[in-house]
């Protein structure tokens, strides 16, 4: 079993979207009903784009500075891995119904530390 290394949250379609980082990233739709049900919550999506365990994550509300790009406004998930990359995802697509397991792909991959 994977040990959870990090957590991040962002507003979701229902209440909150919770992300748990380990060998991959699992996404959960968290609602008050789920929290008070006493039942185990299953993940709604798994992201497996990193080539190593995920070490850190953060969410950010992205608001473009140029008004013509406001369609890109929304929450983003930034994930850092021991593979020395940072992946950037638009959270609105994570866990969407009918999404294929390889999607959503990162909108950017930053290559860093050597």
Image (cartoon, helix red, strand yellow):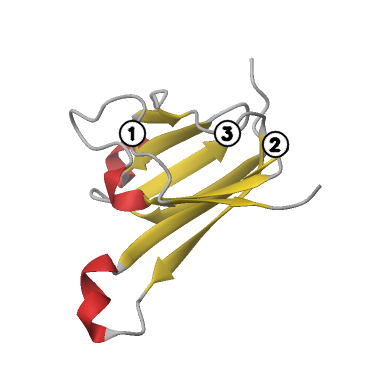
Crowding near pointer 3: few (<14 within 10 Å), some, many (20+)?
Answer: many
Front in this rendered view, residue 79 or 22: 79
Q: Secondary structure at mark 3?
A: loop
Picture quadrant where residue 3 is located: top right
Q: Residue at x 28, y 45 (%)?
A: 93
Q: CA distance from mark 1 to mark 3?
A: 13 Å
Q: Position of residue 59 (x, y in %)?
A: 49, 59
Q: Earlier in the sequence, mark 2 or mark 3?
A: 3
Q: Residue furthest left?
A: 98
Q: Which labelled disc corresponds to residue 103?
A: 1
Q: Earlier in the sequence, mark 1 or mark 3?
A: 3
Crowding near pointer 1: few (<14 within 10 Å), some, many (20+)?
Answer: some
Q: Is residue 44 above or below residue 55?
A: above
Front in this rendered view, residue 14 or 97: 97
Q: CA distance from mark 1 to mark 2?
A: 20 Å
Q: Secondary structure at mark 2?
A: loop
Front in this rendered view, residue 110 or 12: 110
Q: Quadrant of the N terminus?
A: top right
Q: CA distance from mark 2 to mark 3?
A: 7 Å
Q: Is residue 114 above or below residue 45?
A: below
Q: Which residue is mark 2?
A: 83
Q: Are marks 1 and 3 in contact (CB under 8 Å)?
A: no
Left/right placement of residue 44 relative to residue 19 reads left
Crowding near pointer 2: few (<14 within 10 Å), some, many (20+)?
Answer: some
Q: Residue at x 31, y 44 (%)?
A: 31
Q: Secondary structure at mark 1?
A: loop
Q: Position of residue 82 (x, y in %)?
A: 73, 38
Q: Which labelled disc corresponds to residue 50?
A: 3
Q: Earlier in the sequence, mark 1 or mark 2?
A: 2
């Amino acid at each position: 079993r994977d040990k959870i290394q990090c957590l991040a949250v962002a507003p979701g379609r229902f209440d909150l979207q919770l992300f748990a980082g380990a060998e991959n990233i699992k996404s959960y739709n968290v609602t008050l009903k789920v929290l008070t049900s006493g039942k185990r919550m299953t993940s709604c999506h798994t992201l497996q784009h990193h080539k190593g365990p995920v070490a850190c994550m953060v969410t950010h509300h992205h608001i473009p500075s140029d008004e013509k790009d406001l369609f890109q406004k929304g929450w983003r998930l930034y994930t850092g891995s021991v593979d020395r990359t940072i992946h950037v995802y638009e959270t609105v697509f994570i866990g969407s119904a009918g999404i294929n397991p390889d999607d959503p792909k990162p909108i950017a991959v930053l290559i860093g530390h050597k």
